[in-house]
């Protein structure tokens, strides 16, 4: 029986649950492995150049769940669990569904039901990650590649935007579960050149600066619960400044002014 004494008050932030997605090779894995004491669950072979602790590349969904179980059941000092990447994990989930349903392809399950069946296994993964966060105090970082998808906005004409490279039902489930969904991209600006006869040529320009987009915009899916700036440099050290409990930014002392003496 509930009583008023059971009401909770005050903010009690836990370790972050985040999805970082972006174009290939931009530095998503480097960002994730700079988090405190990371362990990576590999579903693709892409970490050979990064010196970090990692499980062997999983070749089945059951291996992924076994890795999560080992982190939950055994004693260790890891503080961050990384899955790299979700789009390859999705392939393992589809293979699991196909094996159970005895079909060759997820598309062989009519009316899109294969993708609905896949959500059960996605929830198993998220439940395992929740247990690591709640019982082991681990931060969760999920990595995914990006794709461009047509967005049907009921308030405007449709337009293209970046989203995680997952089936839309899985992407929605994961995005809802996460505290932060961050898009890793390059800072780009455009330059229009008048070529006469009412014709303009638009060029995309940029310095190669890599940034995290933290808020929803027409060009990309994103969200955060930390009141982050709209953009951050793509570096864990920059993101960590906004984590609960992070040291406050140093405030520069006010300049000392002196009144000149007159003689």
Image: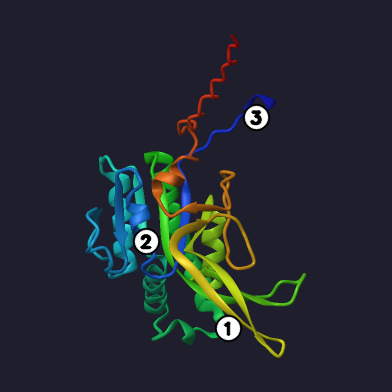
Q: Nearer the viewer, residue 87 or 161?
A: 161
- The correct choice, above or below, for 4 with respect to 78 in the image is above
Q: Nearer the viewer, residue 122 or 49?
A: 49
Residue drawn at the location 44% of the way across and 59% of the way down: 124
Residue drawn at the location 55% of the way across and 80% of the way down: 112
Cα–Cα span, label 3 and label 1: 44 Å
Q: Give left or right: position of 137 versus 49.
A: right
Q: Which residue is mark 2?
A: 27
Element assignment for label 2: loop
Residue drawn at the location 44% of the way across and 45% of the way down: 238
* Quadrant of the frame with the N terminus: top right
Element assignment for label 3: loop
Residue 261 position in % (x across, y down) = 58, 11
Residue 158 position in % (x across, y down) = 69, 77
Neighbour tally class for label 3: few under 14, some 14-19, many 20 plus, Cα within 10 Å: few
Between disc 2 and disc 3, whose residue precedes?
A: 3
Between disc 3 and disc 1, whose residue precedes?
A: 3
Cα–Cα span, label 2 and label 3: 43 Å
Q: Which residue is mark 3?
A: 7
Q: Which residue is mark 1?
A: 111
């Amino acid at each position: 029986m509930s009583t008023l004494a059971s009401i909770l008050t005050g903010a009690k932030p836990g370790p972050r649950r985040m999805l970082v997605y972006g174009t290939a090779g931009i530095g998503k894995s480097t960002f994730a492995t700079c988090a405190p004491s990371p362990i990576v669950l590999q579903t693709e072979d892409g970490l050979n150049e990064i010196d970090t602790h990692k499980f062997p590349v999983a070749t089945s969904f059951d291996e992924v769940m076994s890795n999560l179980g080992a982190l939950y059941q055994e004693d260790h000092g890891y503080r961050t669990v990384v899955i790299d990447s979700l789009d390859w994990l999705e392939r393992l989930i589809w293979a699991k569904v196909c094996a159970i349903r005895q079909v060759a392809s997820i598309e062989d399950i009519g009316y899109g039901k294969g993708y609905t069946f896949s959500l059960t296994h996605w929830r198993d993964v998220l439940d395992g990650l929740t247990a690591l966060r709640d019982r082991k105090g681990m931060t969760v970082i999920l990595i995914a590649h990006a794709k461009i998808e047509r967005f049907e906005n009921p308030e405007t004409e449709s337009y293209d935007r970046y989203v995680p490279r997952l089936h839309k039902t899985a992407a929605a489930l994961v995005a809802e579960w996460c505290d932060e969904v961050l898009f890793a991209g390059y800072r780009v600006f455009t330059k229009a050149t008048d070529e006469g006869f009412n014709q303009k040529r638009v060029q995309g320009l940029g310095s190669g600066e890599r940034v995290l987009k933290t808020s929803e915009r027409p060009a990309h899916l994103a969200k955060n619960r930390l009141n982050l700036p709209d953009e951050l440099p793509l570096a864990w050290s920059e993101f960590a400044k906004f984590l609960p409990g992070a040291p406050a930014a140093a405030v520069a002392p006010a300049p000392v002014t002196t009144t000149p003496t007159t003689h």
